[in-house]
Amino acid sequence: TQLLEQSPQFLSIQEGENLTVYCNSSSVFSSLQWYRQEPGEGPVLLVTVVTGGEVKKLKRLTFQFGDARKDSSLHITAAQTGDTGLYLCAGNTGGFKTIFGAGTRLFVKA
Amino acid sequence: KAGVTQTPRYLIKTRGQQVTLSCSPISGHRSVSWYQQTPGQGLQFLFEYFSETQRNKGNFPGRFSGRQFSNSRSEMNVSTLELGDSALYLCASSFDSGRAAETQYFGPGTRLLVL
């Protein structure tokens, strides 16, 4: 069974702090996505990474794809209350299935 | 380009009834996937359609069914509703070259409440 493990499951931090969320698997992914979801809404795509070792930046968010394409991380610098939400990673293994992690619920306090 | 749209956004039904949810994918996208999301179980894959054919299926009972039309629009149906079917139902579309799964784009979801 292919699994994507996300950690931590929950994170509560103060505004201005930095944080890192991890997504790990024993499977190799042809591509991996990160989404952010707010309550009652659908997940919104943040980034897709496809190359091992790739680093992508989106303002204060930095995404890294592991060299072996089995893991990824999302780092947020100087978190803001607007970053609050559920962060999901998803991976494609080259077939026609997409695997989702269980998500990391982030709460940023003012 | 318009995003993925889902109708209705909110729905209240009673046990035993049936419900049909609709999804219009991004123009040009041929693959449509459906997910059920609940606080306890997270995002659970229901099924995926490509070119009007069900290509993948999750582990849900036969009460859950779907179909895709020639214009790639998709519907999912749940018959004999149970209280546990209360959830956010998400539709996602992807371009899909036909070679492998590609990035999915989600709609806003349909919130179903079964009383």
Image: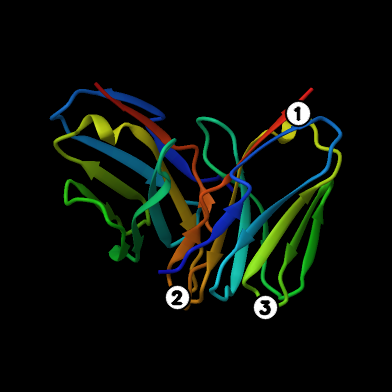
Judge depth for marks 1 and 2 and give the one in front: 1
Position of residue A56 measured from the top left corner of the image (x, y, whole percent): 79, 61
Amino acid under disc 2? Gly
Left or right: B17 in relation to A73: left
CA neighbours of label 1 inside 10 A, class few (<14), some (14 to 19), many (20+): some
Secondary structure found at label 2: loop
Amino acid under disc 3? Ala
Amino acid under disc 1? Thr
Q: CA distance from mark 3 to mark 1?
A: 33 Å
Quickly name the residue at label 2.
Answer: A95
Residue visible at 50% across and 37% down in the picture: B108
- Quadrant assignment, res B37: top left
Q: CA distance from mark 1 to mark 2?
A: 37 Å
Q: Are marks 2 and 3 in contact (CB under 8 Å)?
A: no
Secondary structure found at label 3: loop
Quickly name the residue at label 3.
Answer: A68
CA neighbours of label 2 inside 10 A, class few (<14), some (14 to 19), many (20+): few
Query: Can you say which quadrant of the picture contains the C terminus of chain A?
Result: top right
Quickly name the residue at label 1.
Answer: A81
Left or right: A36 in relation to A56: left
Residue in front for this viewpoint, A75 or B52: A75
| B82, above or below B75, in the image | above
Q: Which numbered disc, 2 or 3, marks the residue that appears first in the sequence? A: 3
- Quadrant assignment, res B115: top left
Host chain of mark 1? A
Residue visible at 39% across and 50% down in the picture: B44
Host chain of mark 2? A
Position of residue A12 measured from the top left corner of the image (x, y, whole percent): 70, 33
Residue visible at 86% across and 34% down in the picture: A16
Q: Which numbered disc, 3 or 1, marks the residue that appears first in the sequence? A: 3
